[in-house]
Amino acid sequence: MKGPTSDMGEPLEPYVPDPTLRAALEDFGQQCDREISVPPQTRLDRGYGGGTLFVARLTEPAPPGREPTRKVFVKVLPARSRHREVRGQQWSRATARATVGDFARQHLAEQIFPPIDLRDGRRLMFQEPTSDFQETTDDGAQVRGLDELDGEDLLAAFRAVLEAVLHEWNSIPPAPATAGPPARETTLGPYLERELRAAGAWEKIHHAMSIFGFHGGAESLLIDSRPLPNPLRTVDPASPHHRQPVRFHAGFAHGDLHGGNVLVPCGADGRPHPERFSLVGLSAIDAEAPLTRDVAALLLATVLRYVPGLTRDESEALIDYLVHPQRGRPGTLPAPVAELVRIADEVGTAYAQPLAGAAIWRRQARLSLIAQALTCTTFEDLRPDRGLWCLRLAARAMQAHIEENPIPYVAATAPPADPAAPVTAVGRWPVSPPDALAPAVPAVPTGSPGASPRQVLLWCMLAAALLALAGVTAWALAPGHT
């Protein structure tokens, strides 16, 4: 790798301590005849999924009059998530530009080089920010992720992202007679399953439930001595709620919208420019997603920053507010986290008002919240405390949905239940959380075939027979016996 020029930044070694990553970047620079450096403020931030994202600068041969240096986002994917990321790279800003116009040009980063596979199984990717983003930070000012913002800066950026995703990316045509985002029809079970699959949590969710001491097929979960409906049960066709009709509005979604994938440029004075944000990590973009997917994902990922610092009463108040935003802010909830919930509800309902009204939007938003909360239970970084809080949130939200949308008596034509499924089982949270690194042992549900009285009786009779046989043998072999 060539040495960086004086105005580019600093060499890699002080800022990229990972030798495998540093060697891959240096090899890339040598092979492509590009100089690679990092801005002095570079920090390697890791997201919930284990990926690393930082800013670098490339200097490459350029014709006279063209700026040879440009800023890029370098993303390092853990080995376990690389296949999902590559699948998503079929999307590009060029594709988006033909579809959604200005939003893509202003806010979507673009994959600019083929991925590089590291020898330890990780994958290195380069994404270029938008021109607005580049112009704002050309003077060497800091780039900050939404996760690094706080106070009014965080609230302003949070609102800017949600408004742009809904009102710009999924803009409603101004003419009343024209169609807005399309409405889709499905049922509750397939809706939740699709959301879990889209988030990459479908293969992990049952294991996550067992780590918390629950059986994924349980009808209800006993959390803090309170039985709550198991939201995962609805994906089973034998559940009476599986076929409950769901109507939702579909459109474009980022699909992995959390603070680590939202970068905000700052001016020379350090003041953030949230309106010029750039979205990275475009692996899960979906053109037919529920429009509440991104809202729920960004909201939950952001409020989870505050959960560890909340008291028991404040934690419960936050769940109540997330499940019932129409009731207004609870008085016990601190301002920053309460404002995040209020902004998400305000932006979403304002967008939905010309479509079908606030009530339908909130119903759809609650289902997306359930799916995102279940997804968060699969993140190792959130276990056990915040993971269990997310599970309680999902169960409470499902309880509210069932209460507000009762279903009629299940018809006799419904598919028969699997006799091995623990339809009436109740999972129990252990007194002390299990070690998250220990092998998961699925809980044995009450009422399962392994705990039936008939089997217990058979085991007792077999034990008695073995004891009797041992006694007879001992008597026969005793000295003096003829």
Image: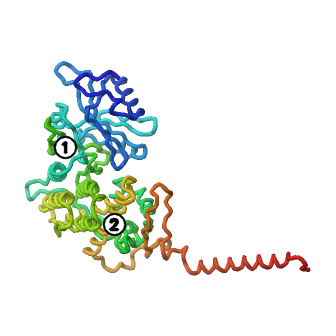
State the image quarter where residue 270 is shown: top left
Q: Front-most of 479 and 364? A: 479
Task: Identify the residue at image location x=39%, y=34%.
Answer: 21
Which secondary structure lies at badge 2? helix
Mark 1 highlights which residue?
Answer: 277
Mark 2: amino acid: Arg
Mark 2 highlights which residue?
Answer: 392
Q: Front-most of 16 and 420? A: 16
The N terminus is located in which quarter?
top left
Task: Identify the residue at image location x=19%, y=43%.
Answer: 277
Q: CA distance from mark 1 to mark 2?
A: 33 Å
Which secondary structure lies at badge 1? loop
In-image side of 78 versus 364 (left or right) = right
Q: Which of the two discs, 1 and 2, sits closer to the camera?
A: 2
Task: Identify the residue at image location x=12%, y=61%.
Answer: 354
- Residue 122 higher or lower than 457, as above or below: above
Q: Front-most of 281 and 394? A: 394
